[in-house]
Image (spheres, rainbow, N blue to C red):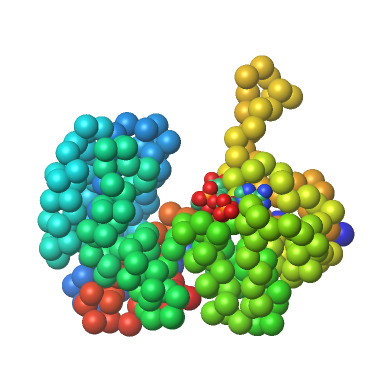
Amino acid sequence: MTARLIDGKSFAEGLRIRIGTHVERLKRDHGITPGLAVVIIGHDPASQVYVTNKARQTLEVGMHSEKYELAETVPEAEVLALIEKLNADPKIHGILVQMPVPKHIDANRIIATIAPHKDVDCFTPESVGRLTIGLPGPVSCTPLGCLMLLRDTLGSLSGKHAIVIGRSNLVGKPMAQLLLRDDCTVTMAHSRTTNLPELVGMADIVVAAVGRPSMIRGEWIKPGATVIDVGINRVPAPDKGEGKTRLVGDVEFAGAVERAGAITPVPGGVGPMTIACLLANTVTTASLIHGLVPPSDLTP
Ligand code: NDP
């Protein structure tokens, strides 16, 4: 069997078009322009690229975008004051502080200061609690993207056995919650799991979010399973030339593609979904702030 490739890039393009339509409707029918503020501290090149892409895509779907670039040495109190200002700003419906932040700044204090109803990354304890008990609100961006791809591939997920490998607050834990909400039977694996090959072999759905290149071997995958590879790992690619690299996922793609029913490639699978889901969350929070029901195709 050769698996069907799950094309996250084109799904994300379609999602952004739908988001643009919802933004247009909010403007036309309610006079609301969803606004996203992105805060970046320091000059980490990877973070700069992410933030530039986020700001560009925000504008492309017709939203209001604000970008705050703070010096590496900015005092924590100044960052907190900026977040408080954005919390109170009616033009802003989503606040994102690009992680990681410099060492002298307490990331937990930053997150705790973001108003939960503007927490489009779903980092605050209140947002995580709402996600867990199924109340409306923002949903962790990468897991939301994975869920959308899974539903698009499989239709109903009810009764499927899913394994989530990785238990981070960013990906693994919220992913498991979303799968549970869709009536999957969920196994969570992590670095202390002893029988990973056996557990993966029982799963209809495999979500890998570890950060270790090709660690999930193709021969572990149950024939016909759906594989969502969240991992993004840069590895040497001597075949491309000296010093060259390429991106690979956490799943050994060449082996898995021969057994799975469907699989996300890396790059071009989950990656493009994350920013699109950030924009979806901003439409959700803008709707909720104004007492409107968020569009059902943008929330779980
Ligand atoms: P973390 O480092 O926060 O978490 C990694 C998880 O993997 C931990 O729970 C860890 O277990 C588990 N783990 C480590 N080694 C093993 C092992 N041998 N067997 C089973 N589990 C193991 O990573 P993130 O969740 O933030 O990210 C995971 C990957 O996803 C990374 O490659 C990251 O770049 C990528 N990513 C991609 C995104 C996208 O947009 N596509 C967005 C976010 C992340 P333990 O808890 O026991 O230590």
Give the x, y percent position of residue 172.
55, 61
Residue 68 higher or lower than 194, as above or below: above
Depth check: give the residue in front, 241 or 174. Answer: 174
Q: Residue at x 32, y 71 (%)?
A: 126
Q: Residue at x 60, y 35 (%)?
A: 234
Q: Residue at x 36, y 37 (%)?
A: 48
Give the x, y percent position of residue 206.
69, 63
Give the x, y percent position of residue 191.
64, 52
Quarter of the image holding residue 28? bottom left
Q: Is residue 28 visible?
A: no
The quadrant in which the N terminus is found is: bottom right
Depth check: give the residue in front, 251 or 215. Answer: 215
Q: With 176 as the anchor, is 97 left or right in this view?
A: left
Q: Is residue 162 visible?
A: yes
Q: Residue at x 69, y 82 (%)?
A: 159
Which residue is the extreme one toward the top? Answer: 242
Quarter of the image holding residue 45? top left
Give the x, y percent position of residue 141.
45, 60
Residue 77 higher or lower than 25, as above or below: above
Q: With 60 as the anchor, is 248 left or right in this view?
A: right
Figure label count? 0
Q: With 107 as the anchor, is 12 left or right in this view?
A: right
